[in-house]
Amino acid sequence: MIENKNIIQNEERAVLVGLVHKLQTEDQLKEYLTELAFLAETAGAVTVKNFMQKLPKPDSKTFVGKGKLEEIRDYVQAKNINLAIFDDELTGSQINNIEEVLKIKTIDRSDLILDIFARRAKTAQAKVQVELAQYQYILPRLRGMWKHLERQGGGIGSRGPGETEIETDRRIVKDKISLLRKRLGEIDKQAMTQRKERGTYIRVALVGYTNVGKSTLMNLLTKSEVFAENKLFATLDTTTRKVVYEQTPFLLSDTVGFIRKLPHHLVESFKSTLDEVREADCLLHVVDISHPAYEDQMGVVNKTLQDIKAFDKPVITIFNKMDLYEERTFDPWLDSEVKQDLLLQLKSRWEHVTHNNCVFISATERRNIDKLRGTILDKVKDLYQERYPYLTQFY
């Protein structure tokens, strides 16, 4: 991994910064900053305050206006803040300019996500994928971030064809990217071979926004022990298990969670992991229905599926955390008949939208899991019948 790339140390105190502009409302920004705070917490930081500013577009030099940056500077000095996290991507020169004013470490959402991925990576494949994404993120920011390197080398051992240190660093990073791509290509071939060796089994993949309960559900459906935690990106590595329902076998895979503003370098470097989604016969789209912005999260997942060309597959939408939804939506004194009527309206709406391909569950309370298993089994049997109409042992 990249040396000294762990951006956040334990208990760093952070401020979050975002913009309201023509493409992003104040309500949207508040939701994004809430998620950014969760990301920061996952990485080990404590969010102390949010700063928002309204601008038509980000300032090309400092992202926020001069006055707002000075306001942030005064606050971080008074409150002993040592980290500023911006909700959108910053250029190298913006980072340099902001740090000159604030005098504290400054990162953006992409850098924060990369840091979390670096911490979560366990397998050789995930580590190479994250390292590749880190170098791809750094490359266009070298000149702005490392201005002190923009000087001609001098002295014994440094005389050469006039190459600046920044150009040397850029060449080193490009060489590293090339090497990592080659290594990842070899790993991808091995993963592809492993997928081909799975034979004729129907493949089902769990997809969804990060922290919606996919790994918990994976454990329920497969009776296995997949790592599950109430943090973003609890797992990066795809886990595949063979499942048999009523003598019908299939393969079920748990995949990395999606998130809005996911760095495109990560999508590129995690291609082989996302191949599990691309090559699946059916997708189980897990949704945290208790989240206030669950429909927006569904949109992010669907957009990502479109981006990786996996949007045309059969999908069963699983609305998880119904227990939390009811707890957060209904007052304790609400009449039970009214509550049931409202739940019926909710379910009817989504049954219409998904063409009856949805199930409402609570993985933690094991509510409606039998119905979910039956829905998955029916879909798997249909897929076997479509693919192997001459076989009978699977259906």
Image (cartoon, helix red, strand yellow):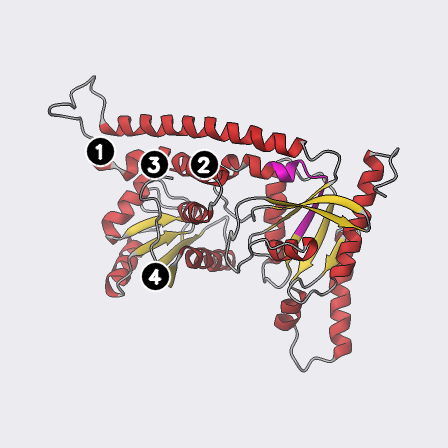
Q: Secondary structure at mark 3?
A: helix
Taking 213 as reference, is 334 left or right? right
Quarter containing the N terminus: top left
Residue 168 rendering spot, x and y as whole percentages: 27, 26
What residue range appears in magenta? 275-285
Q: Disc 2 or 3, which lies upstream in sequence?
A: 2
Indicate which label's residue lies in the foreground, 1 or 4. 4
Whether the residues at callouts 1 and 2 have beta carbons within 8 Å, the answer is: no
Taking 68 as reference, is 349 left or right? right
Q: Spot the residue most to the top.
A: 161
Circle 3: residue type:
Arg
Residue 278 on the magenta segment: yes
Q: Disc 3 or 1, which lies upstream in sequence?
A: 3
Q: Quadrant of residue 358?
A: bottom right
Indicate which label's residue lies in the foreground, 1 or 2. 2
Instruction: State the residue position of label 3.
Output: 141
Instruction: State the residue position of label 4.
Output: 11
Q: Secondary structure at mark 1?
A: helix
Circle 1: residue type:
Leu
Real-space Cα separation, disc 2 to disc 4, in angstroms: 28 Å
Instruction: State the residue position of label 2.
Output: 128
Q: 279 or 73: which is nearer to us? A: 279
Instruction: State the residue position of label 1.
Output: 149
Q: Residue at x 64, y 56 (%)?
A: 219
Real-space Cα separation, disc 2 to disc 3, in angstroms: 21 Å
